[in-house]
Image: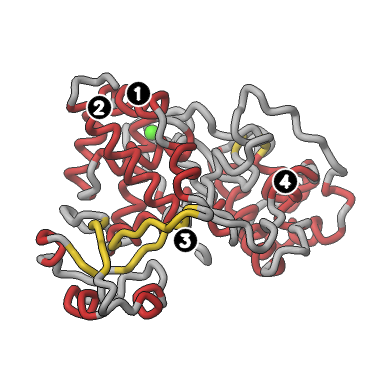
Amino acid sequence: MKFPTACLAALLAASLPCLPASAAAPTAAKKKAQAPAPAKGVPYASRADAMQLAEDIAERRQLEPRWVRQAIGQAQMLPVVVRLMQPAPPGTPKNWALYRSRFIDPVRIQAGVRFWQEHRAALERAHQEFGVPPEIVVGILGVETIYGQQMGSFRVLDALATLAFDFPSAHPRAAERAEYFRGELEQFLVLQQRAGTDPTRPLGSYAGAMGMPQFMPTSWARWALDYDGDGRIDLWRSPADVIGSVANYFKAFGWQPGMPTHYPVRFDLQRLDKEALLAPDILPTFSVPSFLAKGAVLDDSAVQHAGPLALVELQNGSDAPSYVAGTENFYVITRYNWSSYYAMAVIELAREVRQALQRGGGS
Ligand SMILES: [Ca+2]
């Protein structure tokens, strides 16, 4: 597993404030109902490199070569996917306030309250079993797909093949990304073959992320669970499977039960060495004493924190940035989607939904 992310938009859009798959493509992937049918390109059956990969996959995975050739051969190159994968122009300012407004709104909060009420038993079971609180699972699913309302309208096969064979060369790490997507395409085919499904059927994001939690195929293979006990894993239609799988993912990446995700932070300008505090980025590195020594000011509860902290900076366009002290659990959320903006949106949506629920389910 090269990039252990469930959902990849952040990783791919290096200079964007990392939109989840459900929102990264406002014209195509975001609104299923409004999305125009993607323009179809030439099927990959005519491409020698695609057919060679089919042979390699068949051999590596001991699959019927004809089935693999036929599957990849049916994939169609989607020019819109290539366009969506282009890196953002350099110097594009990040804007937390704008990003936040896309995900924290009354409609999403209400949908979160309903999801929590309807699936309380599975959320509590996952809390017991994996130590991941319901609100975090609810926050993830709200930001990713509004609880399954926007799961993407691209054929996963087409999206993965396009990114495997025609990744935009303008991207600074095009070769590495293309290799990553060849691996995801391979895993996708293995999953479909095992499940006996037609590989042209599944729909997902323009990056090939699938279902309510937007799992990439390798995440699906490693962390998805049958959590409703019907003998199959369905991350499109089984909320229990989705809840168990997300909690399992978080546990695998080191979620620590009971640890806050972040604390408020202020600065003592006399002592502040912001450059040093920001150097490790979001990786929690500083003990509380060293954090304080470099000019961070923490509330009493944060001063008691035992583990390492990171200074997380969220830019607000031309306005002053926002800062929080991120814990190891904040970092775990960024393993789902590699972005501090994403993590903060998940955390804030989670809190809003919990508060609405506590007020009696209304906003
Ligand atoms: Ca199931």
Quadrant of res 296 = bottom left
Disc 1: which residue: 110
Taking the image as shown, residue 264 lies to the left or right of residue 26, namely left
Disc 2: which residue: 356
User: Which circle, 2 or 3, is nearer the viewer?
Assistant: 2
User: Which circle, 1 or 3, is nearer the viewer?
Assistant: 1
Q: Is mark 3 within 8 Å of ligand 1?
A: no
Quadrant of res 320 = bottom left
Residue 277 placement (x, y as % from top left): 34, 75
Disc 3: which residue: 4
Taking the image as shown, residue 94 lies to the left or right of residue 78, namely left
At 85% from the left edge and 48% from the top edge, which residue is drawn? 45
Residue nearer the viewer, 311 or 43: 311
Residue 58 placement (x, y as % from top left): 68, 57
At 53% from the left edge and 66% from the top edge, which residue is drawn? 2
C-alpha span from label 2 to label 3: 32 Å
At 67% from the left edge and 65% from the top edge, which residue is drawn? 179
C-alpha span from label 2 to label 1: 8 Å
First-in-chain label (1 vs 3): 3
- Determine the secondary structure under disc 2: helix
Q: Amino acid at mark 3?
A: Pro
User: Which circle, 4 or 2, is nearer the viewer?
Assistant: 2
At 59% from the left edge and 34% from the top edge, which residue is drawn? 30
Disc 4: which residue: 81
